[in-house]
Image: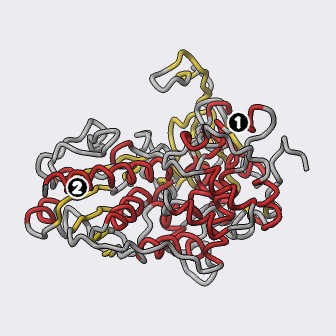
Amino acid sequence: MDILKKVPIREQDPSVRVNNFEEVCLGYTIDEAMEEGLRCIQCKNPRCVKGCPVSIDIPGFIKEIVNNNFKDAYEVINKYSALPAVCGRVCPQESQCEEVCIRGIKGEPVAIGKLERFVADWARENNILPKPPQNKNGRKVAIIGSGPAGITCAGEMAKYGYDVTIFEALHEPGGVLVYGIPEFRLPKEKVVKPEIENVKSLGVKIETNVIVGKSVTIDELLDEEGYEAVFIASGAGLPKFMGIPGENANGVFSANEYLTRSNLMKAFDEDYDTPIITGERVAVVGGGNVAMDAARTAVRLGAKVTIVYRRSESELPARTEEVHHAKEEGIEFMFLTNPKEILVDDKGWVKGMKCVRMDLGDEDSTGRRRPIEIEGTEFIIDVDSVIMSLGTSPNPLISSTTKGLETNRYQCIVADDETGMTSREGVFAGGDAVTGSATVILAMGAGKAAAKAMNQYILSKNS
């Protein structure tokens, strides 16, 4: 055993997986997980815990893995996280817990995410469920949205003893976990649904097909329905576009629409007739994780895919693992390139995309060098579909139908960083509805922090 290197993780061969939607990463076996767990040096002051947005006792659960106590390992994780099988798959551990792992100073950090996934999968396969709360306090709270922030907040409030109801706009709970992340990264039936069921087993109720702001308003929930607090976790599902000519052509998608159709309408299942036009040559504009997801989905639907990104490879915001997998699957990258116009044929369909070469200037407000067009470098790439993956912003429906709820110029709800408290008394918010598009684990951290603050708010109000 080489203690300086992670135990390798098994994956589907790229030439095989581009033809299916099955999970790419196959996870650790028991022996592999125990061997990787031995690499943890059990720090007395574990920096990895501070690097985790939900503060999981990482050395604690790894110690139980090494001792062959997988049920105990799950119970340790479950104290802190409602979605361990999800987080073990999609969290950017390399920039959080693993980034500060002491083992990583000399050699590779401990594979914390893969070990979390192993424990969660073992618990599911062995029907280990979270322990339900012992006492109910009879007080009602409402959660708007069933994505990672909402599910986390709901689970925490249930543990405090509250009667929790989640209101979900779509027909299936899970938010971005269900509609935004492809099956090959996050299986829905195998992983997402069981973890949502675990939260429901705590007594949480989920009402689907309820559009807050239309079906019911937050003011009505607080003033007429008897809810003592509301947590807004409605995400950021409003896609951004560039505003260039041709963006309204047939064959132009937002990544949000493309992935939602693929997931909720089951484009990954050959038995379903999903209304999604992929095209033979697809350009994906953007460089984040969502861009990688859209590109890798298009490959599996039979397209030749090029990712167009206006900065260099070193500035790609996507996870290193996702970029690596995309390259393995034959996706081409066109860096320092930006679209200028989408070319349209006489029937209104995409027939190409005019682009321009870019250079990098001074740093902008994000700390990255600002892209600058190079005059006279326009050229055309041959594509018949374009997927825009430029980020998302919150839908203004909730903020526009709630009295006294402050938003910023990006339509994000203004909320306290530590408590999630908004300008409207009794209303808290967190996740993408506050920050704009971000990661699953950051949304979970916001949901957990807001639950603590909501509990304190209700107790103080009734004391």
Number of labels in the image equals 2
Residue visible at 34% across and 56% down in the picture: 233
Horizontal side, residue 86 vs residue 67: left or right: left
Q: Nearer the viewer, mark 2 or mark 1?
A: 1
Horizontal side, residue 79 vs residue 121: left or right: left
Q: Nearer the viewer, residue 392 or 258?
A: 392
Which amino acid type is marked by label 2? Ile
**Residue behind mark 1:** 102
Q: Nearer the viewer, residue 27 or 448?
A: 448
Check disc 2 and report its element: helix, strand or loop: helix
Distance between mark 2 and mark 1 Cα atoms: 44 Å
Q: Residue 354 appears in which quarter of the rendering?
A: top right
Mark 2 crowd level (few <14, some 14–19, many ≥20, 10 Å Cα): many
In the rendered image, residue 12, in percent from the top left (x then y), is placed at 79, 64
Q: Is residue 21 visible?
A: yes
In the rendered image, residue 15, in percent from the top left (x then y), is placed at 82, 62
**Residue behind mark 2:** 398
In the rendered image, residue 235, in percent from the top left (x then y), is placed at 37, 54
Of all residues shown, which one is farthest toward the top?
362
Check disc 1 and report its element: helix, strand or loop: helix
Which amino acid type is marked by label 1? Ile
In the rendered image, residue 272, in percent from the top left (x then y), is placed at 56, 81
Q: Quadrant of the C terminus?
A: bottom left
Residue visible at 69% across and 67% down in the picture: 69
Horizontal side, residue 65 vs residue 386: left or right: right
